[in-house]
Image (spheres, rainbow, N blue to C red):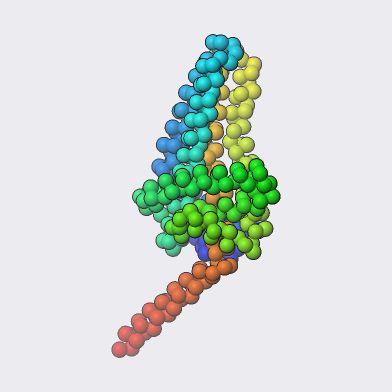
């Protein structure tokens, strides 16, 4: 039987990556079940609306053979809907995974039940949504106007949501806390997050490969059904790729607990306290037996 992973401990670069995969492997079924229950609606809605709006644009272009005002309007609506649904789905996946991990740690490294994750999910969802907009705007400003600060704050912002959910913190506190945690450990955190995103990107490429192949093959077909198949397969692949985002979230969570442990030794103090309780219980039982 695999040993359940302890989040509250100091880890090095390779250990964080290895344990992220180990945690995903150990919790794959309950975590995926939580994602399906809590994020399935957003993913399904995104697929349906994306297919409908994209087909409307394709059909309009086919009728007019070139972009008309109606085509431009439909394309604009399509892009806006895609952005909104992407944000809602991203928020749902983030809130679900972080809530699952928070409960896993609180329960003593035991996978939580769906209703427990749902209670956390509905409490944090709107907070994560508003925070995602603020963090996204902040990141855009940093990268567009100040490239180097943008590179620096990227791993910092990866700790924003772990702080918000694991410590039940406000947006302002989460922002300052993330900078405090990463202060002397920027390189290991940045390297870990970067590797996680590169791995996720490679998995995403594998996931969208069927859509690419279908699109390539449809180029040799003139039937309208071929275009429909391309749109449907592409939309499904696009939204299922959100599930790949689970890995960077797990990695960011391990980074958070690693930095917290280095700064405050919370896990070590907790283990010492637990040992004291255990020793006290043993002594109490011994006294009762002697009596």
Assign the C terminus to one quadrant of the image.
bottom left
For the image, the number of numbered tags is: 0
Q: Residue furthest left?
A: 291
Q: Residue furthest right?
A: 148
Instruction: Kindly indicate the quadrant of the structure image that contains residue 181.
Output: bottom right
Residue 176: % across, % down:
54, 59
Name which quarter of the figure residue 102 lies in.
bottom left
Classify residue 201 by image quadrant: top right
- At 53% across and 40% down in the image, what residue appears? 242
Q: Horizontal placement of 65 versus 89: left or right?
A: right
Q: Please, is residue 53 above or below residue 11 in the view?
A: above
In the displayed image of the protein, which residue is found farthest to the front?
145
Residue at (60%, 60%) from the top-left corner? 182
Q: As rendered, which of 49 and 20 lies closer to the eye? A: 49
Tell me the residue at 50%/69% (across/down): 266
* Position above or below: 125 against 166: above
Q: Which residue does the image show at 59% across and 11% down from the upper left?
A: 65
Residue 253: x %, y % from top left? 53, 56
Residue 92 on image: x %, y %: 45, 43
Q: Position of residue 30 (x, y in %)?
A: 44, 49
- Residue 94 shows up from this direction: no
Q: Is residue 290 visible?
A: yes
Q: 109 left or right of 185?
A: left
């Amino acid at each position: 039987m695999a040993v359940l992973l302890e989040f509250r401990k100091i880890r090095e670069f390779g250990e964080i990556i290895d344990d992220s995969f180990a945690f995903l492997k150990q919790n794959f079924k309950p975590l995926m079940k939580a994602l399906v229950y809590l994020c399935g609606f957003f993913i399904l809605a995104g697929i349906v609306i994306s297919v409908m709006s994209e087909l409307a644009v394709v059909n309009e272009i086919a009728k007019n053979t070139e972009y008309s005002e109606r085509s431009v309007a439909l394309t604009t609506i399509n892009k806006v809907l895609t952005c909104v649904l992407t944000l809602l789905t991203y928020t749902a996946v983030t809130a679900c995974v972080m809530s699952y991990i928070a409960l896993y740690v609180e329960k003593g490294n035991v996978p939580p039940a769906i209703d427990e994750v749902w209670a956390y999910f509905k409490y944090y969802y709107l907070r994560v949504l508003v925070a995602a907009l603020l963090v996204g705007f902040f990141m855009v400003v940093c990268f567009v106007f100040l490239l180097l600060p943008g590179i620096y704050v990227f791993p910092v912002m990866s700790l924003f949501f772990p702080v918000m959910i694991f410590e039940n913190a406000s947006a302002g506190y989460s922002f300052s806390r993330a900078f405090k945690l990463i202060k002397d450990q920027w390189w290991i955190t940045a390297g870990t997050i970067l590797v996680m995103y590169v791995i996720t990107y490679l998995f995403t490429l594998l996931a969208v490969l069927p859509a690419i192949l279908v699109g390539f093959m449809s180029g040799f077909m003139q039937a309208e059904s071929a275009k429909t198949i391309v749109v449907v397969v592409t939309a499904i692949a696009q939204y299922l790729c959100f599930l790949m985002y689970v890995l960077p979230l797990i990695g960011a969570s391990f980074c958070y607990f690693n930095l917290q442990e280095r700064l405050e030794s919370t896990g070590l103090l907790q283990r010492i306290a637990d040992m004291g309780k255990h020793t006290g219980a043993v002594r109490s039982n011994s006294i009762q037996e002697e009596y």
